[in-house]
Amino acid sequence: MTVMRGEALAALHRVFGYEAFRGEQEAVIEHVIAGGDAVVLMPTGGGKSLCYQIPALVRPGTGVVVSPLIALMQDQVDALRALGVRAGFVNSTQDFDERRVVEAEFLAGELDLLYLAPERLRLEGTLDLLSRGKISVFAIDEAHCVSQWGHDFRPDYLALSLLGERWPEVPRIALTATATHATHREITERLHMPQARHFVASFDRPNIQYRIVPKADPKKQLLAFLREEHAGDAGIVYCLSRNSVEKTAEFLTRNGIEAVPYHAGLDAGTRAAHQARFLREDGLVVVATIAFGMGIDKPDVRFVAHLDLPKSVEGYYQETGRAGRDGLPSTAWMAYGLGDVIQQRKLIQSGEGDESFRRRAHQHLDAMLALCETVRCRRGQLLAYFGQDPDPAGCGNCDTCLTPPETWDGTVAAQKVLSTVVRLQRERGQKFGAVQIVDILLGRRTAKVIQFDHDQLSVFGIGEELTEVEWRGVVRQLLAQGLLAVEGEYGTLVLTEASGAVLRREREVPLRKEPKKPVTSRSGGSGASGSGRGERKAAVAELPEALLPAFEALRAWRAEQAREQGVPAYVIFHDATLREIVTVWPTSVAELGGISGVGEKKLATYGEGVVAVLGSLGGPSGAAGGDGAEPDPGPEEEPGFEPEPEPDWA
Ligand code: ADP
Ligand code: ZN
């Protein structure tokens, strides 16, 4: 083992309290410590932060981290300081004096990590400051923000290419969770990193269960999903519009689920307050537009729900990826229906941008629709989209694997829909939306049908063999398959070039039957082995009953610590760490130090507190209501353990 590698491993153990590197981490870290540039593609929760934090700790100088997430810098820095890492940030939320302190620390070589917003690198003052200190590594986080086609484009990121010119000897590492080849190439080009080595991790998130349900009454469906599977859990609900964000948050709150709204129309203070509550409180739901979530590294988000269709698979993957960073079972749930397809197509048609922009937007949507309508493994489809090889046998932890949908021959049904569209246009010169088409097929004499004499059409009432829901399903799938298209601001239906083959009986149309019984996380699957009551939280699903009181006692202790220090609870310890603690039940501080996620600094700060909480419960069996006869062991004497001296910022 090289010296550097030994030092990296030592830092992993000592500072972070982790046993071993995960996946590509070791290779990335070794490469960067040796001075190489790296482009790192890892899914959310994959462990990107260590890839630059450890090189910053091992190499001489300060690691400079460029991140667009100003609102989260304070928490990131707090979390690092709780680990004993000398971290600071410079951004527009600070006043002059605060900034001066951090700058002075940087110049004095007293910082391991310095977080900067990208816009600061446009300022000559910042560049000048950086050139007067010693830099160990540049980390460019959320590197996909450099991509002009992406959904998170930040013009300031384009200026980051100058880092390599100005500091050619400092290694650069660009990191992102967005994995398509196009984005990957753009990052490499625009950041001018032709020499970089590329590290592409597996994009699978096995602990996330993917489910897409047919949309009927979405708010009620959401409520049932939350009540049955995620009572008391923290999660994010995504909606397309500000209005539906507000309404959904209200609806949940009225129904006993604490939820706060988040969208760009709220003032900055409210947004920050809601975000802070989400990070700090246990079990809060945020209902948000896509304005929310980038860089939110709350590890115990147990579900991400979509009430509207995301615009692209990339967006869907990023948003759902915010669930389950701690590796515990989590759910990505979406309600999707005909209205979504029409709405998204309309948005693209009437939106800004030139023809090529629209074409791309349609392609993105097509890929998203294919994911929604697939009869095969959703995870497999996602991985294939990102250019990775899925397990051909399926994942066993998505709705289509758990309850494989049936298909049926929808050729005749498709012909009926398409002929109705054709007749309206040829015989009447009219175009109508899906509602009218379905009413005609079902032979309904609605006011609008009578107004336009549509009961005189030969196709009137030819579709009584299917229900309204089923016809809407047919129309939706025809749209998704490109056999129908949406036009204009009213979302009228028109034929496509491919429609002709269906009408001429040259092409069959297999359609997906909607599953009758919805899948729940308890339907089985590798990622969700919870066995018990509906109200039991997913996070503790695998803990034996006898250990639950101890887990809850530690959470209560953690909440108090977090409140006192004004930091999110997970900055103290993650749920996963607390679970391991109650499972191992350490009786001494030294024993506690062997648990994953307990590094030196945390052991020194919280070790006695944790052991005291466990001691007061009287052992794992006592925790289940035992005798309480065990005396409180009190603080342990630990001869071999030297707490680190308090750094001067503490
Ligand atoms: P990303 O930035 O890629 O989304 P993070 O860096 O936030 O992911 O890491 C996700 C979670 O995994 C964090 O809780 C982190 O502490 C944990 N983690 C990262 N690397 C390791 C490791 N080698 N061993 C154990 N846990 C790890
Ligand atoms: Zn699957």
Image (tube, rainbow, N blue to C red):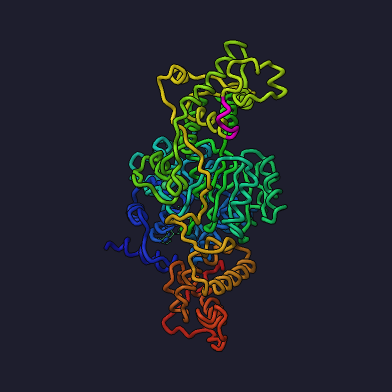
Q: Residue at x 49, y 34 (%)?
A: 369
Closer-to-camera residue (363/83): 363
Count of numbered labels shown in the rendering: 0
Who's the residue at 41% across and 35% down the image? 182
The residue at 45%/21% (across/down) is 502
Q: Is residue 575 magenta?
A: no
Horizontal and vertical percent for residue 205?
43, 51
- Residue 155, placed above or below residue 613: above
Residue 460, given in percent of the width and then of the height, sits at 61, 20
> Measured along the vertical axis of the image, is residue 374 above or below residue 59?
above
> Which residue occupies the foreground of this view, 366 or 578?
366
Identify the image quadrant of residue 408.
top left
In which quadrant of the rendered image does the N terminus lie?
A: bottom left
Q: Is residue 109 visible?
A: no
Q: Residue furthest left?
A: 1
Taking 396 as reference, is 494 left or right?
A: right
| Furthest residue toward front | 465
* Majority secondary structure in the magenta region: loop
In the image, residue 566 sits, relative to residue 404, either above or below, namely below
Q: Nearer the viewer, residue 534 or 11?
A: 534
Vertical order, 216 against 418 (above or below) = below
- Can the viewer see residue 526? yes
Q: Residue 422 falls in which quadrant of the image?
A: top right
- Tell me where residue 552 appears, x and y as whole percent: 58, 70
Q: Position of residue 157 (x, y in %)?
A: 50, 40
What residue sits 53% from the left and 58% below the top? 300
Q: Which residues are magenta?
A: 463-469
Q: Is residue 24 left or right of residue 84?
A: left
Q: Is residue 466 magenta?
A: yes
In what quadrant of the picture does the C terminus appear? bottom right
